[in-house]
Image (spheres, helix red, strand yellow):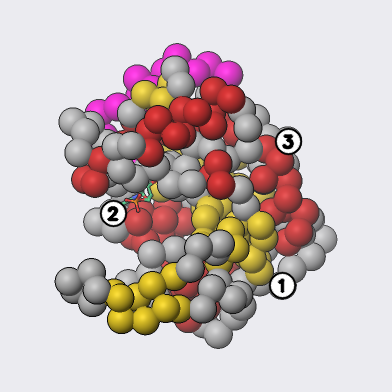
């Protein structure tokens, strides 16, 4: 039997409305290059990753310029202009388009373009922890803060126990066949793991890193640059 291979799929078709910038957040300059390029390069240059796919919107006017100068990535990255209305749709469209290149047992690592702090060590940890796993899993961080649930007026309604609570990150790594089936069956999911859970499975949580946070608000940019420049 051929051993399963590992592919990266990066949904990058969002508009990043919460960032309030004049172009999509995945293309904002960060420590000298477009945000998307950070994670994309980490995957493309990783020895365990066979190939990387980036899903952008059909009208994307940035990706060609961003990748044009990156000749060292040319054979390792394919752009799919099949973005959808939601992250869920963008990932599923991407999976459908690459179906003729993967087998059902190949692994797919789905990663947000807006998490530039991914490192090769984190990919190693995820891949090695899950290599014999029947289902797959995701990077995540145990919650350290005390959690409050509020009402619409920001008044505390209850304190939620943080015991056994984790914040999900990406990459989320599942077998191609199971992941595509799960996303085709799912409605209203914000990550791949939720779709797998809806089928009754229990994805494995693998400890991620604070530097792998999702850049969402304008002040996140400075923090991301600190991590990237300091390489911590
Ligand atoms: O907006 P948010 O930060 O949750 O998006 C997470 C990831 O999903 C980003 O990389 C974004 O570009 C991507 N996305 C997408 N298609 C959409 C919405 C978001 O590929 N329609």
Q: Which residues are magenta?
A: 56-73
Of mark 2 and mark 3, the one earlier in the sequence is 3
Name the residue located 42 percent from the left edge and 52 percent from the top edge: 94
Residue 58 counted in the magenta span: yes
Residue 111 counted in the magenta span: no
Res. 98 visible in picture: yes
Is label 2 within 8 A of ligand 1 (CB to nearest ligand atom)? yes
Q: Secondary structure at mark 3?
A: loop
Dividing the image into 4 quarters, which one contains the C terminus?
Answer: top right
Mark 3 and mark 1: Cα distance apart in space: 23 Å
Q: Secondary structure at mark 1?
A: loop
Q: Position of residue 118 (x, y in %)?
A: 57, 40
Dividing the image into 4 quarters, which one contains the N terminus?
Answer: bottom right
Mark 1 residue crowding within 10 angstroms, few (<14) / some (14–19) / many (20+): few
Q: Give yes or no for contact between labels 3 and 1 (Cβ–Cβ under 8 Å).
A: no
Q: Position of residue 36 (x, y in %)?
A: 43, 33
Q: Quadrant of residue 141 in the image?
A: bottom right
Which is nearer the eye, 64 or 189?
A: 189
- State the mark number for residue 229: none
Mark 2 residue crowding within 10 angstroms, few (<14) / some (14–19) / many (20+): many
Q: Is residue 22 shown above or below 127?
A: above
Disc count in the image?
3
Badge 1 is on which residue? 134
Q: Secondary structure at mark 2?
A: loop
Badge 2 is on which residue? 84
Name the residue located 69 percent from the left edge and 54 percent from the top edge: 126
Of mark 3 and mark 1, the one earlier in the sequence is 3
- State the mark number for residue 47: 3
Q: Is residue 11 shown above or below 34?
A: below
Left or right of 38 on screen, residue 1:
right
Q: Give yes or no for contact between labels 2 and 3 (Cβ–Cβ under 8 Å).
A: no
């Amino acid at each position: 039997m051929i051993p399963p291979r590992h592919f990266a799929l990066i949904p990058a078709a969002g508009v990043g409305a919460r960032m309030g910038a004049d172009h999509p957040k995945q293309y904002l300059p960060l420590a000298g290059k477009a945000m998307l390029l950070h994670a994309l390069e980490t995957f493309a240059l990783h020895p365990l990753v066979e190939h990387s796919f980036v899903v952008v919107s059909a009208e994307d006017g940035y990706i060609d310029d961003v990748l044009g100068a990156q000749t060292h990535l040319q054979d390792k990255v394919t752009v799919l202009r099949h973005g959808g209305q939601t992250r869920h749709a963008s990932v599923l469209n991407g999976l459908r388009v690459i179906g003729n290149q993967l087998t059902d047992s190949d692994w797919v690592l789905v990663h947000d373009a807006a998490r530039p702090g991914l490192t090769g060590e984190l990919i190693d940890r995820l891949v090695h922890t899950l290599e014999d796993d029947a289902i797959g899993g995701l990077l995540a961080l145990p919650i350290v803060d005390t959690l409050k649930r509020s009402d619409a007026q920001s008044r505390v309604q209850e304190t939620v126990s943080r015991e056994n609570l984790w914040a999900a990150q990406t990459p989320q790594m599942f077998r191609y066949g199971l992941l595509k089936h799960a996303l085709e069956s799912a409605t209203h999911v914000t990550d791949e793991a939720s779709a797998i859970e809806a089928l009754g499975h229990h994805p494995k949580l693998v400890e991620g890193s604070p530097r792998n946070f999702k850049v969402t608000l304008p002040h996140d940019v400075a923090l991301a640059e600190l991590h990237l420049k300091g390489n911590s």
